[in-house]
Image (cartoon, rainbow, N blue to C red):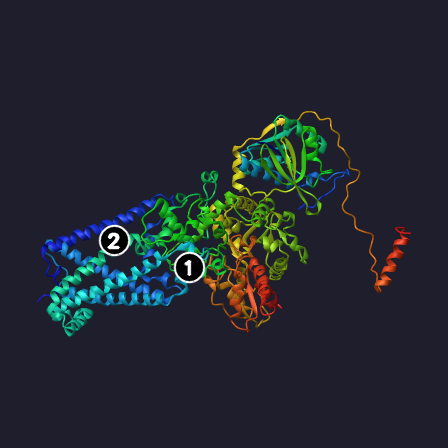
């Protein structure tokens, strides 16, 4: 199987986040970036499949600051090829998906595995959008992908702890929620070694027609409430005070 | 009459020839055995131990002469071993003198063994022969008592999964063979003296007495024929023994001299680097030929004395690791693969066949991950085995394979990403200083006499941050000019290295050295014994030479020169826990004790203290791994030990942030909260300052 794993970096939430002067974006100059955790799981599941079936795994990312590091790390973990898509300036998620899909198309994929979402997503639709632009089927919120017959069996998580198994034909896009095992550790020395020896293939992005899908009106930190009132008295008294307050606020009549 | 004795007494010449043929074949067999071993060691990698050969030789000779490493903490075994050792050496020299006299000097018409020399010779040999036998009897008695340390039961396998009867057989053969050789030697002497009764033979007191016995038993009329039979019996035993040496535990007589001679005094304190070349193929040992010849020698050096098995915190906690069994398994594996023949070995049941990956299968990963790198095994080993080096080299291979538990993996990733094991922002490294009434100097910007290397736990752990503030306050009020590196400090890497993540370690060393290089300070102190060890012993290999001390040493100096005054006598009864990386690794056992004395507390040491301290279980990355499967955590065992001192000891004093965290927990989890108060020495210092 030819597995393509689109990966990207997201803001590291360990650091304090700041909003920039425009008020509609994060202050990207102070951000620390790291690999999207869900993409890490997508890569892990792809590498497990590689070990099970002898597939080839290609990690692919859009050009961005420090993106080489996550590509080299993917290579050190076992990806066979790493590709950087160049020439896009601050694309929206929809543009990114379109540009990525165009490059992936040229790689004739059997399976495209990517993170189901990312902390900086606005709509969490990357897997869906990729499937749309690639014109192939898609399953998301997946926790395992196993090769079976000519296709794959995927487990998809639903709310309430339900899991469904799907048989799917290839090619297919999978949005990975979690891999079967936690993403593997790769020794620092190995990454450093790969940085010296491996090469990142660069592919220029084509022109994109997609729009952003949505736009940001205001970016703000969670706001605190406007004060709290402690209710005292017996349970009945407290209950009647709650009802009274709700009426005063016009929430109930 | 000239005092002497006849060599090959009443031997027909043919018998003498036969003896030489047998003797030379035996020696050939002996040499072949060691040649096979030599070939095995040659398959190992270079170890770089050929510097200062004369010094090494003499140092090992001194240890051997005194049997000091055997005596250490076991006077009985030490004394018995000393007698056997010197008995054997003197009897061996005696035999060499006889051979030299008869086979060499005789042909020059010279003779040594006559007159007064002969009498002295007889006397000395008799005395040492007695020592030899007494030592052996002491050892037999000891074994008959079945002491726990000589029990070969494994921690990690069920009884049916292995068979170590070979080891027990070897133990018996070794002792009995030596004993019978000594005994028959005296019998020959006795019966020879009985035959002729030369008066000067009273100088062989044992032989003389046995001759008397022979008279009483009526054996003397048959003395001449009995002598020749006894002589041959003795000779056959000796020949068997010589042939047996290289294939059995008796090899320790020679191998262990070499092992002590080539021991690295910095073993475990400074781990071996991985060459850039090797880094390319993975850091760790993948096959037996990756071991250095010294490590292969280590495996053969083990006498199964069980001391490491007894002191190991991992073994005591019921984990699958026993340093003894690890070394023996590596010996078995080495002999099976690049081998030298071994007569008495262990066997495994078919389901426990020793095959597959060296790190992970032949040596189970749980065995390797159980080690706390406390160094107790290396410290206690009487024959200079460097267990820890092998463990870390095998762990490196597990890291290459990614064969580790998730919590450890996450911690390493955090250290790589943020420079601390807590996975917190680098920018928050100095947040602990916020509660102070003064600003701690930033040595990157301002000059200070001391740089305080704070370490991860003291910086980020909310339980420890208060202690760090206390250190800062005490030093401030003593007028000490100090500063910190703020967010430029990273985990020093001591435990990262001992986990086996050498690449990450090197990255941390580079980053810390860069930060230290920019700092304006004269010397370093640290509150963390782990950082202390690596900066002191390992950073120099990367070009980082700093003057570094532990804060207990600094505080003591301040007390001595009057900068720090303890106005209050505390009067507590306390016990003090020596941190492994301070006491055992670096010999710093006195400063904390003197400091406690200056505070007016009464110190009662636990049975295991100073260099023999018992690990809290946190080292070598264990603090980042799961300890819920242990029978009893090492920290809980230690609290039990402290409680055994009796009710009057109320405080358990530590001098290491990890110890504070571990023992504060252990007091609670072992249900002893309220009975023992865990305190850092700095808290007492603060109190004593009034």
- Mark 2 is surrounded, within 10 Å at the Cα level, by few (under 14), some (14 to 19) or many (20 or more) other residues, namely many
Dot label at residue B153: 1
On the image, the x and y values in percent for residue B566 come to 58, 68
Determine whether B572 is above or below B551 in the image: below
Residue B209 appears left or right of B456: left
- Quadrant containing the C terminus of chain B is bottom right
Q: Which image quadrant for residue A156?
A: top right
Front-most of residues B284 and B590: B284
Dot label at residue B405: none
The residue at the point 74 percent across, 41 percent down is A19
Determine whether A100 is above or below B288 in the image: above
Q: Which image quadrant for residue A144?
A: top right
Label total for image: 2
Query: Which residue, given by chain and number where applicable, does mark 2 sit on?
Result: B243
On the image, the x and y values in percent for residue B427 come to 65, 48
The residue at the point 73 percent across, 40 percent down is A26
Front-most of residues B614 and B166: B166
- Mark 1 is surrounded, within 10 Å at the Cα level, by few (under 14), some (14 to 19) or many (20 or more) other residues, namely some
Secondary structure category for the residue under label 1 = loop
Q: Tell which subunit mark 2 falls on.
A: B
Determine whether B689 is above or below B252 in the image: below
Report whether residue B49 is seen: no
Q: Tell which subunit mark 1 falls on.
A: B
* Front label number (1 vs 2): 1
């Amino acid at each position: 199987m030819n597995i393509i794993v689109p990966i990207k970096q997201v803001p590291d939430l360990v650091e304090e986040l700041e909003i920039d002067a425009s008020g509609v974006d994060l202050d990207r100059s102070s951000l620390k970036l790291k690999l999207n955790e869900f993409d890490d799981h997508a890569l892990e599941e792809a590498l497990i499949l590689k070990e099970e079936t002898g597939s080839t795994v290609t990690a692919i990312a859009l050009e961005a600051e420090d993106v080489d590091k996550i590509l080299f790390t993917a290579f050190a973990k076992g990806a066979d090829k790493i590709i950087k898509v160049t020439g896009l300036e601050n694309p929206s998620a929809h543009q990114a998906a379109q540009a990525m899909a165009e490059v992936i198309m040229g790689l004739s994929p059997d399976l495209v595995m990517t993170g189901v979402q990312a902390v900086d997503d606005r709509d969490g639709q990357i897997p869906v959008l990729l499937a749309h632009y690639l014109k192939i089927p898609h399953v998301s919120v997946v926790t395992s992908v196993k090769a079976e017959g000519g296709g794959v069996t995927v487990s998809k998580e639903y709310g309430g702890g339900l899991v469904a198994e799907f048989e799917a034909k290839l090619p297919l896009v999978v949005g990975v929620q979690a891999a079967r095992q936690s993403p593997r550790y790769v020794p620092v020395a190995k990454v450093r070694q790969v940085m010296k020896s491996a090469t990142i293939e660069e592919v220029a992005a084509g022109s994109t027609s997609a729009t952003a899908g949505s736009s940001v009106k205001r970016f703000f930190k969670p706001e605190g409430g406007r004060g709290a009132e402690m209710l005292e008295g017996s349970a009945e008294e407290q209950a009647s005070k709650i009802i009274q307050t709700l009426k005063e606020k016009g929430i109930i009549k | 009459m000239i005092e002497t004795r006849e060599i090959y007494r009443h031997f027909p010449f043919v018998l003498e020839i036969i003896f030489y043929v047998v003797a030379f074949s035996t020696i050939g067999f002996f040499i072949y055995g060691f040649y096979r071993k030599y070939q095995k060691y040659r398959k190992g990698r270079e170890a770089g131990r050929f510097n200062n050969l004369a010094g090494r030789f003499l140092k090992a000779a001194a240890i051997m002469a005194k049997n000091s490493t055997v005596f250490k903490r076991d006077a009985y075994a030490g004394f018995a071993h000393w007698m056997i050792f010197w008995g054997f050496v003197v009897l061996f020299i005696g035999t060499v003198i006889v051979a030299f006299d008869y086979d060499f000097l005789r042909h020059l018409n010279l003779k040594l063994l006559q007159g007064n020399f002969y009498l002295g010779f007889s006397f000395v040999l008799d005395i040492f022969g007695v020592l030899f036998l007494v030592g052996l009897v002491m050892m037999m008695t000891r074994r008959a008592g079945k002491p726990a340390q000589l029990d070969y039961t494994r921690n990690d396998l069920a009884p049916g999964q292995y068979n170590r009867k070979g080891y027990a057989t070897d133990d018996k053969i070794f002792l009995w063979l030596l004993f019978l050789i000594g005994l028959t030697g005296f019998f020959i002497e006795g019966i020879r003296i009985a035959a002729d009764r030369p008066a000067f033979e009273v100088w062989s007191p044992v032989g003389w007495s046995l001759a008397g016995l022979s008279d009483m038993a009526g054996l003397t009329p048959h003395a001449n024929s009995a002598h020749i039979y006894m002589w041959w019996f003795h000779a056959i035993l000796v020949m068997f023994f010589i042939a047996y040496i290289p294939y059995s535990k008796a090899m320790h007589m020679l191998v262990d001299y070499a092992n002590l001679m080539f021991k690295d005094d910095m073993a475990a304190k400074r781990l071996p680097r991985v060459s850039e070349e090797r880094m390319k193929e993975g850091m760790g040992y993948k096959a037996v030929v990756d071991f250095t010849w010294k490590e292969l020698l280590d495996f053969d050096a083990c006498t199964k004395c069980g001391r490491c098995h007894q002191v190991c915190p991992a073994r005591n906690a019921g984990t699958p690791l026993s340093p003894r069994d690890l070394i023996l398994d590596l010996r078995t594996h080495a002999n099976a693969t690049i081998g030298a023949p071994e007569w008495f070995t262990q066997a495994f049941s078919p389901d426990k066949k020793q095959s597959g990956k060296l790190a992970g299968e032949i040596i189970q990963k749980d065995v390797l991950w159980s080690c706390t790198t406390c160094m107790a095994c290396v410290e206690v080993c009487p024959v200079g085995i460097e267990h820890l080096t092998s463990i870390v080299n095998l762990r490196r291979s597990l890291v290459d394979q990614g064969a580790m538990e998730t919590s450890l993996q996450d911690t390493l990733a955090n250290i790589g990403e943020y420079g601390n094991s807590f996975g917190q922002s680098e920018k928050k490294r100095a947040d602990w200083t916020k509660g102070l009434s003064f600003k701690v100097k930033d040595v990157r910007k301002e000059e200070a006499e001391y740089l305080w290397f704070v370490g991860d736990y003291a910086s980020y752990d909310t339980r420890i941050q208060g202690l760090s503030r206390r250190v800062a306050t005490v030093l401030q009020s003593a007028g000490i000019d100090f500063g910190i590196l703020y967010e430029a400090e990273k985990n020093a890497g001591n435990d990262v290295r001992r986990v086996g993540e050498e690449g990450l370690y090197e990255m941390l060393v580079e980053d810390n050295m860069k930060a230290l290089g920019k700092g304006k300070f004269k010397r370093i102190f640290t509150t963390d014994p782990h950082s202390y060890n690596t900066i002191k012993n390992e950073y120099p290999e990367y070009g980082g030479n700093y003057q570094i001390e532990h804060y207990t040493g600094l505080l003591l100096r301040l007390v001595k020169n009057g900068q720090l005054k303890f106005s209050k006598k505390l009067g507590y009864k306390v016990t003090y826990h020596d941190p492994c990386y301070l006491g055992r690794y670096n010999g710093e056992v006195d400063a904390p004790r003197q400091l406690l004395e200056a505070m007016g507390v009464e110190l009662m040491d636990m049975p295991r203290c100073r260099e023999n301290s018992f690990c809290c279980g946190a080292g070598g990355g264990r603090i980042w791994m799961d300890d819920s499967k242990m029978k009893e955590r090492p920290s809980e065992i230690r609290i039990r030990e402290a409680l055994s001192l009796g009710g009057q000891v109320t405080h358990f004093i530590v001098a290491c942030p990890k110890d504070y965290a571990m023992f504060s927990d252990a007091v609670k989890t072992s249900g002893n909260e309220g009975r023992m108060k865990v305190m850092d020495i700095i808290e007492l210092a603060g109190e004593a300052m009034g």
